[in-house]
Image: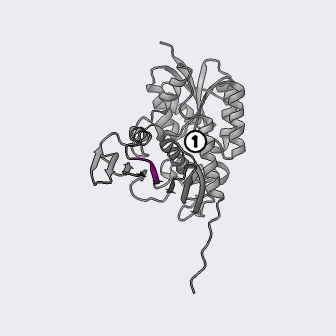
Amino acid sequence: MTQITVGIIGCGSITRFRHAPEYKANPYVKNIVFYDRNIERAQRLASEFSGDVADTIEDLLHNPDIIALSDCSSNENHHINTPNALLNGKHVLCEKPIAVSIEQAESILEAQTKSGKKLMVDHNQRFTKAHQTAKRMIKNKELGDVLTFKTSFGHKGPEHWGINKTNSTWFFKKERSHFGVAGDLGIHKIDLLHFLLDDEIAETRSFSGTLDKVNEHGEPIPVYDNVVCALKTKKGRLGTASFSWTYYGSEDNSTSIYCEKGVIKLYHEPENQLIVETIDGDITKYPIEPIQTNDNQTSTGVIDAFIESIMNDTDPPVTGEDALTSLKVIVALLQDESSVLPNRG
């Protein structure tokens, strides 16, 4: 069996809990080479996952043994690292969001076209079994056409997830994360809606705010910790979405799809990840699999899909074009100016 060596740029929590263990478990991967600006982080992960360390990013990119890599750098570096890797002959799995501007994302797609290499973006919600099952139900119109939808993604914040576990996290820095909670959590749900509905968000209305989060100096963070929005798709479906870093209880990663003959509920109950309620009142519960959370790390399936696309020379299931489509929605949400109604006399 052919096996390959892969590289990873950036050795934070997303690498330690998701990319590295999933590469390690993939039968087609024989070795992982880690790079981080903080070489001690790379050394720790290399030790933990029996891999190697690249002293510089050039060493990683110019290593002829490395066939593919994950760009797990912070958001502001994707438009630098991912094109460089592609143009150095590597297939790339880029963390989301693909970039912090539409122009940067387009430059990444140009590099991918020029290189001829594969580019996949880590929108991992497409891969859960409950979402895959719901996709089939919707495609087969088991409950008729989709009419409306609502979705939510919120937890207590990235300072509880990131590698340094403090309010100095890069997610709170405007120049690094850029989009705040919308780019961290919201873009996952936008991509999921596009996937489930085989449709695209065409119009947005939103409210955004920094309601509670402060940085290491006790100052309100310069990116939004909450976004609430109304959405309309190209096919005329209407829905709502909320994204939050201030859900100070259990994580909420739920979605409801309302159809002509009933509703599909996803991840509303811990034990029954998919629930179908028909217009006649029948309720069927499906205990499929728990969704991955910050506190419950399970395999996302993303790495396996990326490696499979390389080994079989097929298009990856989440393309750069898919990621750009979702990014455009996030940009629109954060640019939206909602009307303020006049007070009643």
Snapshot quadrant of residue 167: bottom right
In percent of the image, x 72 and y 37: which residue is there? 107
In percent of the image, x 65 and y 21: which residue is there? 63
Snapshot quadrant of residue 113: top right
Local secondary structure at mark 1: loop
Between 303 and 314, the one lying in front of the other is: 314
Query: In the rendering, at what x and y percent does residue 161 appear?
Result: 48, 48
Q: Amino acid at mark 1?
A: Lys
Between 221 and 192, the one lying in front of the other is: 192
Query: In the rendering, at what x and y percent does residue 286 appear?
Result: 30, 43
Work out whether 282 lies above or below 22: below
Would you say 208 lies left or right of 145 here? Answer: right
Name the residue carrying label 1: 96
> Residue lying furthest bottom in this view?
345
> Residue lying furthest top in this view?
1
Give the prevailing secondary structure in the magenta stretch. Answer: strand
In percent of the image, x 56 and y 55: which residue is there? 232
Q: Is residue 210 magenta?
A: no
Between 153 and 212, the one lying in front of the other is: 153
Query: In the rendering, at what x and y percent does residue 164 appear?
Result: 53, 47
Which span is picked out in magenta?
Answer: 144-148
- Asked whether the viewer can see residue 44, the reply is yes
| Colour mapping | one colour
Query: In the rendering, at what x and y percent does residue 25 appear?
Result: 43, 26
Work out whether 294 lies above or below 332: above
